[in-house]
Image (cartoon, rainbow, N blue to C red):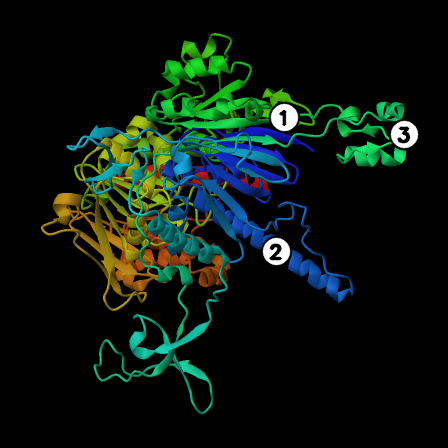
Amino acid sequence: MLNYVQILSTPTADTPGACLLLHFDNRRYLFGHLAEGTQRLMVQRKLSANKLEHIFLSGNIDWHSTGGLLGMILTIADVHAGAKAAMAEANQKRKEQGKAEKKKNANSGGSDGLFDALYIHGGKNLTHMLAAARRFVFRKGLPLRPHEIGTESTAASRKNSRKNGSAPDWQDDNIQVWNVPIVPAPAVAERSDGSPLAKRRRLSGEEEDTHMTSQGEAVAGSAADEEADQKVRESVVKEMFDSTWRLDALITTNLHDVQLPAKIFVRDEKTGHIQKYNGPMPDKDKDCPNIKVLVREPWPSTKISRLPKTTPSTTSMCYIAKSHPRRGKFMAAEAKRLGVAPVDFKKLTNGESVTLANGKVVTPGMVLEPNIPGHGFAIIDLRYQSLIDAFLGRPEWENADIMQGIEAMYWIFDHDVHKDKRIAAFMQRHSSIKHVVLSGQISPNHLALESPSSQIIKMHTIDGSRFPLPVFSNEAAALPETLSSGGVEAQVGRPGATIQFAPRVVVQDDKIVPPMDTLAPIQELASDPEILTLAKAAKEKVADPTWVKRIEELEKDMPNRDAEIVTLGTGSALPSKYRNVSATLIRVPGYGSYLLDCGENTLGQLRRVFGHSGADEILKDLKAIYISHLHADHHLGTASILRRRSELVEGSVAVIATSAFHGWLDEYREVEALGKIDSVYLGNGNGSTPGRQAYPSCPSNGWDLEKEVGLKSVEAVYVDHCHSATAVVLTWPTGLKIAYSGDCRPSPPFARLGKGAHLMIHECTFDDDLQGDALAKKHSTMSEALDIGRQMQARRILLTHFSQRYPKIPVISEESQNQNQAVDRSVLFAFDYMRVKLGEFKHAEAYLPALRRLYAEEEGRQS
Ligand SMILES: [Zn+2]
């Protein structure tokens, strides 16, 4: 059986986390950070998730270590559902042919995509973090088993002791795992009565006193309370993935107890048929009868409106993992020499002794070579200086049984921990082990996703003003000298670097993924000279002063022509090879920056476009984040944006969304501090029927939209997509008006709200020939999006989410083109990393023939 550990990701802008893949033929395991971008990287590396059964999260639970987890779970659930459906279909065929049904192979691990459950191991708040996502993650038939290790309520984890000597904490048929929770010493202060006092900062900023017992154990609330709270979270997670709930199931209730708004049904007494209830309602008619009615059963995990409170954890989870020891080789000749009959060999190999006819006893130890120890690795997550002492104090490192066969230690560092002399001394004490460093401060910020990078390099060559080269570096920062002295040669980990454990131990540096060849895309581009000819023609056109003058004349009534639109993520649904999920940045000089939706790894996309410090400058200037709806592809990047922003500035940022998103954010913020947020709720007391307006709330008394956010107005309307999805129209004091659709079926009320917008950004997930799909999946086609733009009389239209399969550019009909020309309307297509100023849509439009030719080429190359 082949068994190896491979570096899947090192910290880059595309993949902020460090992650290891442990391979066995029947099962895969991930260790480290399931950060944003991990899943997209797996798509790029063509790694399927179908044998992935265990995820061991290192570090403390925060968005840095878990930001990609929810997206990954959704993908695995879909892989699983697909495999299940395929098996059911195959069995149906077998049945028709009179053959016996094929059963799931119990020993296959997940190799047929039909494992029993997805196990996620991690520290305190893992369950809370998962349960908080109940508002947007629900999949049936993928049992999820969070395994929260060493919560701070258990004394064992705090005492840093390993009670059971060398016994592993967890094992399956492949590996043994030792959990190594690193618990930093609490900052101890003196109380007035002389007893030690630990201060824990809470999210709200106030400090909570926690008494210390004589054993140094903090007492915060009763253990029984905490256990009951955890039960609630666990049951929520179980319901999210494992419930028997059916969308169409109706339950009987009293009319007065119905939570409004709701679709209410009644059973016709005579016919027994179910019909819609249209009678008096309890909220409008006080004489409303309290009759028995039927309502849809709510999604069970949403019945809990608020999870029990939690606090951030500082415990950092580390792991030691290795394969089981194997039995030594059977020495048949020796057994024969001792007089054992061949028929008894099996007993000896099974560990039994054999008594010979002469009464002599032959034990297995006499005829078996010594056991071959298991091989494995340790993953050490030390992102904070405060962890170093506790790390050094762990007993595992000096336990010869546990450390035997540990070939490598993978170190996740941050905050200069790698410079600490104690770390160097530790490595020197364990110099026979390979030490591999994975750190955002050291690892090269290489282009981890070659496909989109190749695309942007080509587009840059065509139109450098709209498509900036991605900011990257293939050079690692130098490791401190202390890490390469005293017999230690620590290395900077590279993606793909592999250590094979079985059949024999081999370091396989030849598996390292080479840095992307950034010249190759330019050479590819040269294979079709016509593209560059078209680009040159466009360049000449936009450089012509007469042409520029004419555009300025046409746009002289347009405010903020220098406002910039940066499309950071333009894909629909899942992160794909070419496109990241939804996020659009609007920068209005003098007013601020605004994010319209914030899909997974929006921060990384920002860092590719603007560099690390450039992205920080934008975050300092960020005034508001608008989230259009609760689908995971529109908001999973919010936490890391807020977190990074809070590290840079004190002031607050507005988050504009409906209550479900705020509910998630409020619960998640208990896990990790995300800075000051002004929560602007979008709502309508009469319900969220598409077409109704959703009005923004005021986050606090005296809060002023223009003063705080730089906006004159925020107007939103419910649209037909998923529950409480909205589209928004933002107006600045200069009169600048930008309308943004999120995901939706075409919405005439949105067109009315955005009347006269200078820019409309609209999704068009489906080509016109897929009208049926657009209807069924509640998205828009290109023609529908353009039609909304016409109704809105939008001057500039930016279409996003188009063509998921290949990044080809759709063709607008000649009729539409003529209409657009007559009213000075420009239509552009959004690509990841594109920067376009409002006053330069015409410039960008000039390059469309070259881009279209490029994508026709690309399509030919891929199909
Ligand atoms: Zn959606």
Please state if 576 lies on the left or on the right of 586 as rendered: right
List x then y, in percent, for residue 71.
45, 46
Q: Secondary structure at mark 1?
A: strand
The residue that appears at 46% across and 67% down in the rendered structure is: 247
799 or 820: which is nearer to us? Answer: 799
User: What numbered label is drawn on residue 863?
Assistant: none
List x then y, in percent, for residue 157.
41, 35
Marks 3 and 1, how far apart at CA: 47 Å
- Residue type at the position of mark 1: Gln
User: What numbered label is drawn on residue 500?
Assistant: 1
Please report contact status of discs 2 and 3: CB closer than 8 Å, yes or no: no
Please state if 549 lies on the left or on the right of 523 as rendered: left
Crowding at dot 1, Cα within 10 Å, few <14 / some 14-19 / many 20+, comes out as many
Q: Earlier in the sequence, mark 3 or mark 1?
A: 3
664 or 300: which is nearer to us? Answer: 300
Q: Residue furthest left?
A: 702
Q: Quadrant of residue 216?
A: top left
Residue beneath disc 3:
358
- Residue type at the position of mark 3: Asn
Residue beneath disc 2:
84
Q: Is residue 685 above or below residue 492?
A: below
Crowding at dot 2, Cα within 10 Å, few <14 / some 14-19 / many 20+, comes out as some
Q: Quadrant of residue 610?
A: top left
Q: Residue furthest top?
A: 486
Examine the rendering and report whether any part of residue 775 can be seen: yes
Mark nearest the camera among 1 and 2 is: 1
Q: Is residue 604 above or below residue 279?
A: above
State which quarter of the image contains the N terminus.
top right
Marks 2 and 3, how far apart at CA: 59 Å
Mark nearest the camera among 3 and 1 is: 3
- Residue type at the position of mark 2: Lys
Crowding at dot 3, Cα within 10 Å, few <14 / some 14-19 / many 20+, comes out as few
